[in-house]
Image (cartoon, coloured by chain):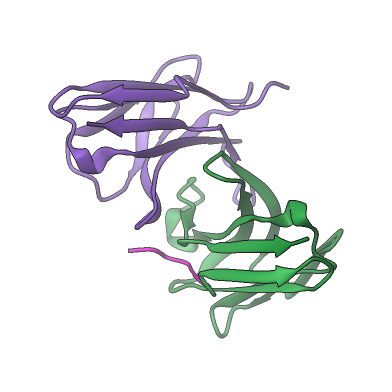
Chain colours: A purple, B green
Amino acid sequence: KAGVTQTPRYLIKTRGQQVTLSCSPISGHRSVSWYQQTPGQGLQFLFEYFSETQRNKGNFPGRFSGRQFSNSRSEMNVSTLELGDSALYLCASSEPYQVHTEAFFGQGTRLTVV
Amino acid sequence: SQQGEEDPQALSIQEGENATMNCSYKTSINNLQWYRQNSGRGLVHLILIRSNEREKHSGRLRVTLDTSKKSSSLLITASRAADTASYFCATDPTSSGGYQKVTFGIGTKLQVIP
């Protein structure tokens, strides 16, 4: 099976712009979660999607949004970028309806806001 | 706030020595997982221990779980330079209702000196 694919791998954006990141989960995985990783805050949960519905959301402002398509691919969008949004954004996929399941991570998208 | 907190935040050992990392968490959990991350890349799942298990082994890894103390430890025996990475514990809280809302700590940065 192919792993979790995140595109692009690197992005440089200017303050005020918006950005869209993409995540293709492992085939058959319908749950996709997004995390933000910064040196100071570690891994912070953004949101989780399952069957095109957002099931869980972390404590992030409304500038952070996401969606999931019928093929389980997911995108996250950050509008009005701030310098503090510079981070590694990771997505993870897992099999649905399994309590004891591991998450498979992509390599991440490194976003730099200048 | 983070559910899991790893201790120590950084650890430096000589190759061949054992490395022990600890994780404390706050709420009741379905399971606890350990992940490894190499230098700003994606996370790799190492081991999952369920809440009704006390100890689990996988190769050179040994994980213990004490639900009464809400803590876990990861022991890497006979460490190698290739073990140099950041290690994260992740908890799947029972309140998540089986949904994927794994919450990570800030990690332990392990350096194994050849």
| Residue A38 visible in the current orientation | yes
| Residue A75 visible in the current orientation | no
Residue at 75% across, 51% down:
B82
Q: Position of residue B65 (x, y in %)?
A: 66, 75
Up-down relation of residue B80 to residue A51 (above or below): below
Q: Count the marks: how many?
A: 0
Prevalent SS, magenta region: loop
Up-down relation of residue B11 to residue A14 (above or below): below
Q: Nearer the viewer, residue A48 or A53?
A: A48
Residue at 47% across, 62% down:
B105
**Quadrant of image for the C terminus of chain B:** bottom right
**Quadrant of image for the N terminus of chain B:** bottom left
Q: Is residue B69 left or right of residue B13?
A: left
Q: Position of residue A1 (x, y in %)?
A: 73, 22
Residue at 43% across, 74% down:
B26
Q: Position of residue B97 (x, y in %)?
A: 46, 53
Single out the residue that lies furthest toward the bottom.
Answer: B69
Q: Position of residue A67 (x, y in %)?
A: 34, 24
What span is colored magenta in the figure? B1-6
Q: Quadrant of residue A52?
A: top left
Residue at 61% across, 46% down:
B38
Q: Nearer the viewer, residue A40 or B58?
A: A40
- Magenta segment includes A54: no
